[in-house]
Image (spheres, grey):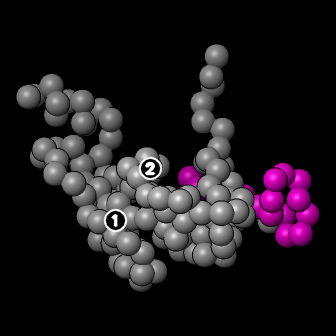
Amino acid sequence: MVEGLSHLTFIAADLDRMEAILTGILGARRIYDSDRAEFSLSPERFYDLAGLWIAVMQGDPLPTRSYNHVAFRIADADYDDYLTRIRDQGLDLREGRPRVVGEGRSIYFHDHDNHLFELHSGTLQERLARYRQG
């Protein structure tokens, strides 16, 4: 039986550039850097983000963008602060998408390797409750 999420792995052409996103925007903390040692497929770094293990391995970026994404929950009160952080790094930013009132707000942005991130202020319970209202 699956016990939970172990980790997320992202492939990035430039580990430092991805680190700037993880630490500077999302508030992750680097906990490991393989430096020149390759215990895996390529140089890698590990981060802790709110108790979640995020691995970043050096490699070729995704060839195209898609709506496949990872979404992190944020407090609605922090929404504008995250917008500023993303804009400060010059990333491709898109605020939200059409939503019904009551399901939270979202910020979407692509990193330099075509990964799509979402910062969302709602919860699954709030969304389901809103959808039940019709």
Query: Residue reaching furthest top?
Result: 1
Specify whether 21 is left or right of 88. right
Query: Which residue is labeled 1 in the image?
Result: 78
Label annotation for residue 69: 2
From this view, report whether residue 37 is shown above or below residue 41. below
The amino acid type, in three-letter code, at marker 1 is: Asp
Q: Residues within 10 Å of mark 1 (few under 14, many from 20)?
A: few
Looking at the image, which is closer to me, 127 or 9?
9
Side of 73 where 14 appears, left or right: right
Q: Reading the chain from its start, which is encountered first: label 2 or label 1?
A: 2
Residue 51 on image: x %, y %: 61, 48
Residue at the location (62% across, 55% down)? 10
Q: Quadrant of the C terminus?
A: top left
* Residue 40: % across, % down: 84, 52
Residue at the image position 17 percent from the left and 30 percent from the top: 131
Secondary structure category for the residue under label 2: strand
Which segment did they paint magenta?
34-51
> Is residue 37 shown in magenta?
yes
